Structures are given as C-alpha cells and as structure tokens.
Image: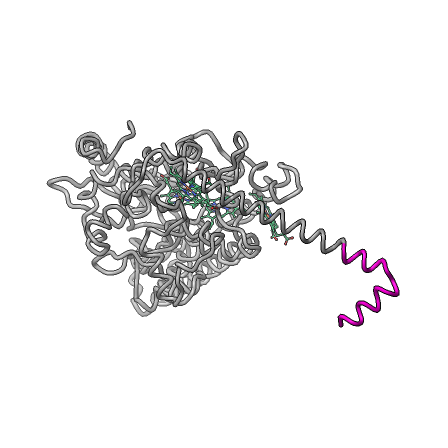
Amino acid sequence: MIKKLTEKIKEKPNIGWGIFIAVMAGVFLLGILAASITERVAEKGALLYNKKVEIKDIESRNEIWGENYPREFKTWKKTADMNFRSKHMGNTVEDALASRPKMVVLWAGYLFAQDYMAPRGHMYAIEDMRATLRTGSPDENTKDIQTASCWVCKTPDVPRMMHETGIEAFYKTPWSAMGDQMVNPIGCADCHDPKTMNLIITRPALVEAFERQGKNIGKATLQEMRSLVCAQCHVEYYFKGDGKYITFPWDGGTTVEDMEKYYDNANFKDWTHALSRAPMIKAQHPDYELFLLGPHAQRGLSCADCHMPYTSEGGIKYSNHQLMSPLKNITNTCQVCHRDSEENLRNYVYQYQDKAIEIRNRVETELAKAHIMAKTAWDKGASEAEMASVLKLLRQAGWRWDFAVASHGASFHAPVETQRILAHALDRTMQAQLELQKILFSRGVKDVAMPDISTKEKAQAYIGLDMKTIRDKKAKWMKNVMPQWIKTAKEKERLLSKQ
Ligand code: HEC
Ligand code: HEC
Ligand code: HEC
Ligand code: HEC
C-alpha cells in the first residue's frame, strides 16, 4: 500500500502536495479542537477558582449558589418570567381543562378532572404544587391525599431531605408533613455537584431504572447527561405499592407498548374510570422517552442543546438557564445548526404541532363519547363478561392518548412517533365504540344522547363533582395553613427568597 502510494506520488507529484495540505489542515483543525477543549477546561477552572462561597453538602438554597455563578443564576431566575406565548405553548398560566373540557370526562374519577394547568417555568414548581386541587387541603381535621412522593420533581429540598430520612421513608411521609421543608423551586442542587459543578443525578428512581436494565448511569457521557438531568423529572413514572415508591416502568423498554406491558404484567391501574369503570393508567410526561425516538435525539442532540443554549456575555460563554420554549430565541437555539429563516423554523414546529393536534382533538371527542356509551351500557344492565374487552380497549386508548399528549413537547420532539401513538389511540377508541354499539343495540338503545360538556364547569357538573365545596376548602387552606409553612421555613433559614 505504502509502496504503491510513493510510486503514485512519483508519477503525479500533485498528489504529494495534496496529502501534505490535507495533513496540515487536519493538524490545524486538531489544534483548534484542542484549543477549544482547553478553553472549556480553562473556563471551568476559572469558574471554580472564582468561587465566593464554599458550598457544602446538599445546598438547596439557590441564592447561595448564585453568589458563585451570577450568570447562570440570573438566567435561572428568569424562569419566573411570564411574557411568552408561541402558537400552542408558553410560560403563562393556562387552565388546560378550560381549553379542553373533554379531558374532564377522560379523567372522570381521578383528581386530574378537578384541576390541570399547563406547565410554566421551573420557578413556579412549588407554588403550583401547593395551589393545585390535586394536593387537597390537609390539616388537623383533613387527611392527606398525597404523599411526599409528589414533591420529588419540584425542589432541591428533596435530595436534602432524602439524605436525612432515607429514600423509602421520604416517599411514605404524608405530603403536608414536608410542607415547611419543601420550599425552594427546582434549582442548582437538582443537577450539579457543588464541588466540581459537574452534572449529577440526584433522583434515585432514574438511577434504579438504569440498574434494573443492567446499565450504569455513572458511565453516561456529558452529552447524555445534558438530557439525563432532565430525565429525572420529565419522564413516565408511577408510585409503586403502598410505600408510593417512585418507579420508572422501563424494565422492558421505554416505548409506549413496552411500558404498557410493564403495567399490565404488574396488574397496575392508577384509577377506575367513574363512567366506564375501565382500569385506567395515567401517563405522566414521557418527554425524555419520546424525545429519544425523534430525529434530533437520533442525531445525538440533548435537551440542553435547545432548551439551555450557550450565550455570550462580555467574552464569557455560559449556558442559558432560563429553561423554556426555544422559540423565544430561535437565533440562539435552532439557528446555531440550521441555515434557515426564523419564520421557516417556527413554522416547522407549528406544522408538526397542528397535525398532532388535529388527531388529538378527534381522539378526545370520540374517547369521551366511548366512556359515556360505556356508562349507558352499564346502566342498561350490560354484564362484566360483555364489557371485558371494551374496558381493555378504553384502558389502551386512554394510555396512548395521554402518553402522546401529556409530554407537551412530543409533537415536535418526535413527530412521527407521536402521530403513530395517536393513530393507535383513535383505533382503540373506535374499536371500543363498535363493540359498545353492539351491546347497546342488543338492549334496544339505538343512540346515546351526549351530555353538554362544552365547558369545564358543565363537564365537571356532569361527572358529579361539587367543585364549589372543593374550591372553598382549598382557598381556606391557602389562607390559613400554607403561609405557616413559609413562615417556619424562613425562621429556620431554609428559604431565603422573599415570596
Ligand atoms: C435542570 C438541570 C439544571 C439546573 C436546575 C441548573 N443547571 Fe447549571 N447546568 C445544567 C446543564 C445541562 C449545564 C451544561 C453543562 C455542560 O454542557 O457542561 C449547566 C451548566 C452550568 C455551569 C457551567 C457553565 C455553563 O454555564 O455552562 C454552571 C456554573 C451552572 N450550570 C450553574 C448553575 C446554577 C448556579 C444553578 C442554580 C441557580 C444551576 N446551574 C441550575 C443543568 C442545570
Ligand atoms: C426536579 C424536576 C425537574 C427537572 C430536573 C427538570 N424539570 Fe422541567 N419542569 C419540571 C416541572 C415540575 C415543571 C412545571 C412547573 C410548573 O408548571 O409549575 C417543568 C417545566 C418545564 C418546562 C416548561 C416551561 C415553560 O415556560 O412552560 C420546560 C421547557 C422544561 N421544564 C424543560 C426542562 C429541561 C430541558 C430540563 C433539563 C435541562 C428540565 N426541565 C429539568 C420539573 C423538572
Ligand atoms: C431540537 C430542539 C429541542 C430539543 C433537543 C428538545 N426540545 Fe423540548 N421543545 C422544543 C420545541 C421547539 C418545543 C415547543 C415549544 C413551543 O411550542 O413553544 C419544545 C417543548 C418542550 C416542552 C413543553 C414546554 C411547554 O411550554 O409546555 C418541554 C417540557 C420540553 N420541550 C422538554 C424537553 C426535554 C426534557 C428534552 C430532552 C429530553 C427536550 N425538550 C429536547 C425543542 C427541543
Ligand atoms: C445542535 C444542532 C441542532 C439544533 C440546535 C436544532 N437542530 Fe434541527 N436538526 C439537527 C440535525 C443534525 C437534524 C437532522 C438533519 C438531517 O438529517 O438532514 C435536524 C433536523 C431537523 C428537522 C427535520 C426533522 C426530520 O423529520 O427529519 C427539523 C424540522 C428541524 N431540525 C427543526 C429544528 C428546530 C425548529 C430547531 C429549534 C427549536 C432545531 N431544529 C434545533 C440539528 C439541530
């Protein structure tokens, strides 16, 4: 080979020069790469060298970290902003049940039918958790309806307290018993080791899910970690057993079918549907799992590439910690890689979303109808045996619909997979309707009259919720109990910010 090449160079001396230039170019590029790596390492060195305070243990107060890392802290604080709306999302308050009242029927018998808000910035995680009707109004006379497991994706006070109580004991504690401990919104200690500032995993459920799959999360690359820190929370999980042990159903894989199989094998249901009596599974927010199946993950991108873009300020490059819609700043996100206009890039996102929403709306209409038809069938004396396959189809349809929709970014993150799942949701829904039609026909019912569920209030009244009582109780609780938590937390210096 070498001999042949030297002979060739003798024949055509241009090749020799070509090789020389190519090698020089390669060396030059390697030099640049090495320089940029040293630069990153030097930047990080400088960052750690310039620390003002020494952070020990698990420090959940973000303000303390802010003294060392003012740029990251300043952008992190901006997750409190409420000034952006894209076509379908944004960082403002949105009552999702008011926008899509059919969801009240889809979740009948479950707390989500009472209250479900679209997500907003990380800064509101604690506030929104306290305020939701889904956490109830626990006090001396009223029992908790949730355990401390609910706090797990809301605050860096979770790893701090888990360290004190142990993991199992933490999950079992009643929700309200941790009220004056869980006070700092999602922050630095959730994702960083204070000594090295390396990315770390602080939530046991993710580490355990990797272990059960025979993988070691400690071996993840930096680029993987730039997604895995998000996968501590933006994933599908459930509360396992009486101890409410947070578990990711990933043992057999992370597709919608893999996880359904896991739940079926465990004979698990989140609740029994109040109208159809189907044993339902609530999907949480499998952003990470769906993202993995999309074009960007398959090209090696991670969440931080779009949601935490590098920003330059006075010659210093840092990661923007204002986690939100990348459409707020397309120049710093999409356009880093795509030579395309802002308008085109925005429209790609909207196109994917609009198409998914087209099918989603069909599923929501028909699935709500199917649950109502099932209720009519029970009312007309249908038997368990007759209804068995209908209930199974309703469980499968509900799981697929929720899986595709509850992970809010999925229609862009993984457009084809999202459409596939929604198509199966619609298919299961229509199969259920066909079977129900037969059962109803055999009992002389030709048509099921649809109730008026055109607003959230009407839908909630239809499924029998007394919202006024529930809401009044919560309002009283917000006035009397909640402020005590904040007061105690401030006295004990667990909380430094105003509020
Ligand atoms: C949800 C996870 C998450 C939270 C919360 C978070 N960070 Fe980060 N942080 C990251 C990621 C991801 C990077 C990029 C790491 C990389 O690419 O090397 C990063 C990078 C950094 C860096 C390295 C320099 C840079 O900007 O790239 C510093 C310093 C930092 N964060 C400080 C903070 C501080 C201070 C807070 C709290 C106010 C915080 N972070 C909260 C995920 C997080
Ligand atoms: C400790 C749990 C946790 C971690 C870690 C976490 N998130 Fe979140 N995230 C949440 C919660 C909870 C909300 C909803 C907060 C609310 O509505 O009050 C949220 C909301 C969001 C939103 C919506 C913001 C808006 O303006 O509407 C985005 C985008 C987001 N997260 C992306 C990420 C990314 C990317 C990462 C990783 C770099 C990440 N999150 C890490 C829990 C977490
Ligand atoms: C290629 C860029 C890109 C990557 C990578 C990416 N996202 Fe997104 N994400 C988007 C876009 C675009 C939207 C839609 C924003 C809109 O419509 O305003 C979005 C939406 C979201 C939302 C919903 C925000 C809201 O306001 O409700 C969440 C949560 C989210 N992404 C989390 C993640 C997580 C977690 C990862 C990694 C597992 C990730 N994203 C990776 C571009 C990206
Ligand atoms: C870090 C680089 C990077 C960023 C940031 C990024 N992309 Fe991409 N994007 C890619 C790569 C690589 C591909 C695959 C290109 C290919 O195979 O031709 C891709 C593919 C796409 C595609 C085609 C998807 C398909 O079905 O094949 C669209 C649309 C797109 N990106 C839009 C966006 C938008 C909108 C944003 C910002 C929210 C964004 N991208 C951010 C690197 C990036």
Q: Position of residue 109 (x, y in %)?
A: 28, 51
Q: Position of residue 325 (x, y in %)?
A: 49, 39
Across the whole image, how many numbered discs are drawn on residues? 0
Residue at 46% in and 36% down: 90
**Res. 332 image quadrant:** top right
Quadrant in which the N terminus appears: bottom right
194 or 491: nearer the viewer: 194
Residue 441 visible? The answer is no
Q: Is residue 139 magenta?
A: no
> In the orientation shown, which residue stands out farthest toward the top?
498
Seen in the image, is 203 located left or right of residue 48? Answer: left
Q: Position of residue 484 (x, y in %)?
A: 17, 32
Magenta part of the protein: which range?
A: 1-20
62 or 116: nearer the viewer: 62
Residue at 31% in and 70% down: 385
Residue 127 visible? The answer is yes
Quadrant location, ligand no. 1: top left
Q: Is residue 4 magenta?
A: yes
Q: Main secondary structure of the magenta part?
A: helix
Residue at 76% in and 70% down: 2
Quadrant in which the C terminus appears: top left
331 or 242: nearer the viewer: 331
Q: Position of residue 420 (x, y in %)?
A: 52, 58
**Res. 373 image quadrant:** bottom left
> In the orientation shown, which residue stands out farthest toward the left?
140
Q: Is residue 388 above or below residue 277?
A: below
Colour convention: one colour
Q: Is residue 74 above or below residue 119?
A: above
